[in-house]
Amino acid sequence: MHLTIVNKAYSSWSLRPWILMRHFAIPFDETVVPLRQSDTSARLLAVSPTGKAPALQDGDIHVWESLAIIEYLAESFPHLAIWPRVKAARAHARAISSEMHAGFMAMRQECSTNFRRAPRPPRKELSADARANIARIEALIADCRQRFGANGAFLFGEFCAADAMYAPVVNRLYAYDIRVNPTTKAYMDAMRALPAWQAWHKDGAAEPWVIEEYEDL
């Protein structure tokens, strides 16, 4: 399998399948296409009809969009607990993953993913919509941990696809020094301790490309 991604320092969408594949030891090669370069669009269009990353190639099969890639991986490796094994937990995990895929736009815009940002508050006060997004995320984490998380430190106990979908949120909360409750903080600590997370963070910090638009938030 070959995964095409964009900057590890800034890309929330690329992080999701990458951290899942790395955590579950699914073999893959990767290509990083830096954003805002003269050939960025052409390189991405060569592997994805949307011209966006991530994109996965598995032989003659091409899959784009983070959640679609995750579903493809779950189907391709059924022996791995990419989604929770219990039906109720699996249904809930898919629902919150879809919610993340489609929502939380205010927080995305005001607290961009940035793996090289030293923790500090955003330059501008967060909007009411962004604060509402954060409140929903904290409630969601607490609910998952209480209902499904007894057997581990993650949303559904063991790390799964839903955690991959929420990984960028952990970076946003940490990088923008958002005050969170103890349950959220414990979940963030567990995520940031993952070897796959640390590998992504190290690679992102070492990248030579800097996008000032993201750095100024």
Image: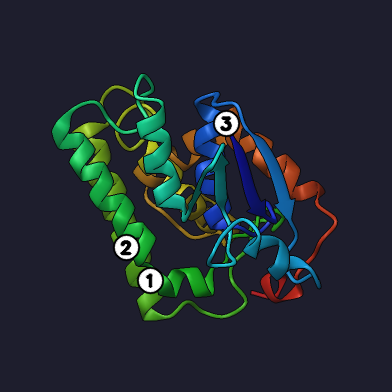
Mark 1 near mark 3, Cβ–Cβ under 8 Å? Answer: no
Position of residue 116 relative to residue 21, above or below, is below
Quadrant placement of the C terminus:
bottom right
Q: Quadrant of residue 155?
A: top left
**Residue placed most toward the observer, 123 or 53:** 53
Q: Amino acid under label 3?
A: Arg
Q: Are marks 1 and 2 in contact (CB under 8 Å)?
A: yes
User: Which comes before the other along the chain, label 1 or label 3?
Assistant: 3
Residue reaching furthest right? Answer: 208
Label 1, label 3: how many angstroms apart (C-alpha)? 32 Å
Task: Look at 26% across and 46% down and name the residue there.
Answer: 94
Residue 36 location in percent, x, y? 75, 71
Q: Which quarter shows the N terminus?
A: top right
Q: Is residue 185 visible?
A: no
- Residue 22 marker: 3
What's the residue at 27%, 43% (across, down)?
93
In the rendering, at what x and y percent does residue 139 appear? 26, 54
Kindly identify which residue carries mark 2: 135
The alpha-carbon separation of the residues under discs 3 and 2 comes to 30 Å
- Compare residues 10 and 188 and report the one nearer the observer: 10
Residue at screen point 29% across, 22% down: 151
Tell which residue pokes out farthest to the top in this image.
79
Q: Is residue 92 visible?
A: yes
Q: Position of residue 187 (x, y in %)?
A: 41, 39
Circle 3: element type: helix
Marks 1 and 2, how far apart in space?
6 Å
Q: Which mark is residue 131?
A: 1
The scheme the figure's colours follow is rainbow
Which residue is at 57% across, 66% downward? 112
Disc 1 packing (10 Å; few <14; some 14–19; many ≥20) = some
